[in-house]
Image (cartoon, rainbow, N blue to C red):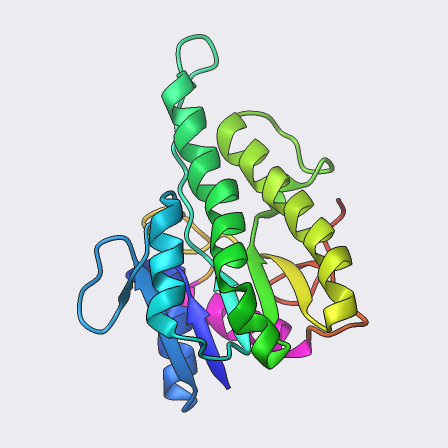
């Protein structure tokens, strides 16, 4: 089983990479500024995604985990914050970057009839709208929509797509007051990815398997 995880240089992405490697899987990770054995990928740059596909040279991918993401509007004030460049950065990474990565690696996924796991957030749900974090919420809702539509289009090719909430994780993004450790989230998500298939493609689930309303 061959796995590729974007944004694997820290936080949840690094925990997922470590989880799979400890389980003996052939797992690769990417980073915008890679160190060690990570592969270079800037999800906001179309040429970078194409270069990654060329580097993989047709390697069949059983699982692509689209984890790379940012939270550019944390702590912004409604009256003075949310500048246009933050919107552009948020959507370029959290939405367009996911699409470009999937698009570039479709031949690799098709070669293995692989799976795609997209990391969104419960903050994307219309049922969970306490306000604030408009850029993050909107971008995660958009990538949820993207995943749901990709699930429809790729189902005839036996490529399943799942969209997942990792929980409130103790990372640089989640902060020290978060609820769960990255390793706990990674183990739960790995179980969800393993369960993903034609009957569950298009699902929106939490790391522990709880369904999330759209």
Please provide percent x and percent y for residue 111: 58, 78
**How many numbered marks have been drawn onto this rendered protein structure?**
0
Q: Left or right: 108 with respect to 74?
A: right
Query: Quick check: is 191 in the magenta stretch?
Result: yes
Q: Residue at x 61, y 58 (%)?
A: 164
Q: Residue at x 37, y 22 (%)?
A: 85
Magenta span: predominant SS is helix
Q: Is residue 78 above or below residue 12?
A: above
Q: Is residue 80 in the magenta section?
A: no
- Which residue reaches farthest bottom? 24
Quick one: which residue is furthest to the right in this view? 199
- Nearer to us in this view, 135 or 29: 29
Q: Is residue 96 above or below residue 106?
A: above
> Which image quadrant for residue 21?
bottom left
**Image quadrant in which the C terminus is located:** top right
* Residue found at the very far left of the displayed protein: 36
- Give x and y (percent) for residue 109: 56, 71
Tell me which residue sits at (72%, 51%) in the image. Answer: 148
Q: Nearer the viewer, residue 113 or 167?
A: 113
Quadrant location of residue 170?
bottom left
> Where is residue 3 shown, x and y percent of the image?
46, 76
- Whether residue 152 is visible to the viewer of this picture, yes or no, is yes
Residue 119, image x and y in percent? 54, 55
User: Range of the magenta residues?
Assistant: 181-195
* Left or right for 20, reference 40: right
* 185 or 92: nearer the viewer: 92
In the image, is 1 to the left or to the right of 57? right
């Amino acid at each position: 089983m061959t796995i590729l995880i974007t944004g694997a240089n820290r936080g949840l992405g690094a925990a997922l990479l470590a989880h799979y490697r400890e389980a003996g899987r052939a797992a690769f990770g990417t980073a915008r500024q890679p160190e060690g054995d990570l592969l270079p990928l800037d999800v906001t740059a179309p040429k970078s995604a194409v270069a990654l596909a060329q580097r993989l040279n047709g390697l069949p991918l059983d699982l692509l985990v689209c984890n790379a993401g940012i939270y550019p509007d944390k702590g912004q004030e409604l009256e003075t914050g949310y500048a246009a460049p933050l919107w552009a950065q948020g959507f370029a990474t959290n939405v367009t970057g996911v699409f470009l990565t999937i698009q570039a690696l479709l031949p690799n996924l098709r070669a293995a009839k692989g799976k795609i796991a997209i990391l969104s957030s419960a903050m994307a749900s219309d049922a969970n709208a306490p306000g604030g974090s408009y850029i993050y919420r909107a971008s995660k809702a958009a990538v949820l929509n993207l995943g749901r539509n990709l699930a429809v289009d790729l189902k005839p090719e036996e490529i399943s797509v799942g969209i997942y909430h990792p929980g409130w994780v103790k990372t640089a993004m989640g902060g020290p007051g978060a609820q769960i450790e990255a390793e706990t989230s990674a183990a739960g998500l790995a179980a969800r990815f393993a369960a993903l298939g034609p009957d569950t493609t298009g699902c929106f689930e939490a790391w522990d398997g709880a369904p999330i309303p759209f």
